[in-house]
Structure formats: structure tokens, C-alpha cells
Image: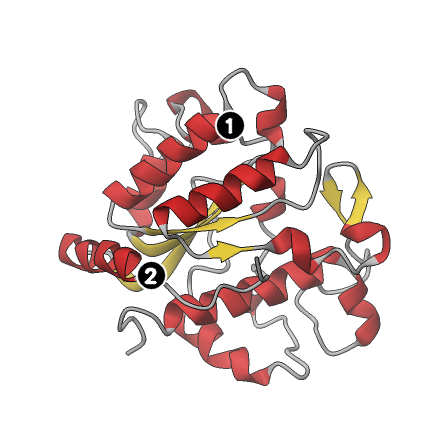
Amino acid sequence: MPVIPGGVSAKMCQVYALGQMLGNNPQAFSKVGDCQSMLPNFLGPFDQGKYDLGAYTGLQPVIDYFSGSFGRNSRATKDGLSAGGALAALWNDWKDCSAMETPLDCEYRIHRPAFAIISLGTNDVYGYAPFETTLRRVIDLTIGHGVVPVLATKADNAEGDHSYNAIIARLAYEYELPLWNFWLAIQPLPEHGMRSPEHLTYGEYTNPADFSQPENMQYAFNVRNLTALQVLEVVMNSCGAEK
């Protein structure tokens, strides 16, 4: 499957339309994931004005359109989060979430996004619940809120046989979801973009949202931010979302 999806299915456009009836914000997206989806590295610089698009200036409208979603703390991102954790109230310690809300329910209630980038799987290797079962529940809950799920493949192979990315791709196909094949995007990078078995490469003194220098694009976090913007461009132009 390609790194960037070709579009959003008619089925998911129906979910988008449902979300609009429920009052979701067409210019908002949420992040759902572990440390690789947290601030400041993932997408945060785009709300801070600390980025250089280099040859990708055509992505500026995406930054303008989704302004406010890049740099906010998602209630559904946390170091070590798994798909099961996203569904567990015990993982929620935000003061603006109720005691019995799951991270997903709290995030969708507060932010009311039209889309959600769901990047899970690494920490599910160490859990007890089957990954496919819990990821399916995450997808169903997201759709139930009228939010279009954008599934992301993971960079690592913590499970040892690449089976989790196969599950992610299979569920994206089954539900007709847009798939961000991030795993494929970083395969050409040194060490396939991994500085350890579970963590992406980044330049210690390099802005992860600076795409202007070829050497910066040898780091997985720079590629992560670039390809995430490209995926958001696809959903922005789908289902009549762009105004």
C-alpha cells in the first residue's frame, strides 16, 4: 500500500457527514497514539510557526486549515499508550476528563474533531488483549463519534513478524479507512528510521518540521511530520471538507 492514501472512501464520507450533524469541527483533527504521537516533536511546530516547508510550500493551506490541532495536547496520546489503554478510563488523568471517561471519549468530546490520526500497536505487543480486537474497538468508537479514523502503520517490528502492520492494513481495507503507511515511508532511511527497536530517529539539534535541508530528511521524525501533513491534505480535500 502507498505511503499516502489516494482519497477518502464514500463510506467514510458518510461518517464525516454524520460528524457534521453531531457538531464536529471540519477543521479539527485529533492524535491518538503513544510517545511517537506526542508533543513537541509530532506536528507541534506547525502551530508554533517553527517550521520550514522547503520544497513543500504547497502544504501551507493544510497548516492554515487545521490550525489549532497541531500543537494541542491530545487527551488520547500518552507515553506507553496501547489500543487497550485508549479504551481504559484508568489511562485518563486529565483534569477536564470525567473519572469514567476513556482517553478516546474524552478527546472526542472536548475537541470534536472531524478526523483522527490513530497510530497504535507498539505497546500492544506487551499487553494481554489481542491487538486486532482492541484496534477494532478503537475504530468502532471513533466512527460512533462521527470521526473519520486515519490508521497509521507503525515503524517498528516489536512483535517480530510484522503481523501488527498486517492487521492495521487489513482493518483499513475492511472498514474502507484512509491508511497512512508510515512504515513504508521510512524504509529508505538509515537504520530504517529507528534509533532503537521502538523509537524513531531525530536530529538532536534539528527541527523535526524543517524540510528545507536534505540531511534533515534522513531523520524519521522529519519524514513523519511531512507525510502526516500530506495525509491531512488528502482528508482536507475530501468529502467537501475544505471550505
The answer to whether residue 195 is left or right of residue 183 is right
Q: Secondary structure at mark 2?
A: loop
The x, y position of residue 170, in whole percent, is 48, 43
* Residue at horizontal 59 percent and vertical 35 percent from the top: 164
**Colouring rule applied to residues:** secondary structure
Instruction: Indicate the quadrant where residue 216 lies.
Output: bottom right
Instruction: Indicate the quadrant where residue 95 lies.
Output: top left
52 or 174: which is nearer to us? Answer: 174
Instruction: Indicate the quadrant where residue 217 lies.
Output: bottom right
Q: Amino acid at mark 1?
A: Phe
184 or 217: which is nearer to us? Answer: 184
The alpha-carbon separation of the residues under discs 2 and 1 comes to 24 Å
Which residue is labeled 1 in the image?
A: 131
**Quadrant (top left, top right, bottom left, bottom right) of the C terminus:** bottom left
The x, y position of residue 18, in whole percent, is 18, 54
Of badges 2 and 1, nearer the viewer stands 2
Identify the disc placed on residue 9.
Answer: 2
Extreme-top residue of the structure: 128
Q: Amino acid at mark 2?
A: Ser
* Residue at horizontal 43 percent and vertical 40 percent from the top: 75
The x, y position of residue 91, in whole percent, is 46, 25
Q: Is residue 42 above or below residue 79?
A: below
**Quadrant (top left, top right, bottom left, bottom right) of the N terminus:** bottom right
The x, y position of residue 93, in whole percent, is 44, 28
Identify the disc placed on residue 198.
Answer: none
Q: Is residue 175 above or below residue 182?
A: above
Q: Secondary structure at mark 1?
A: helix
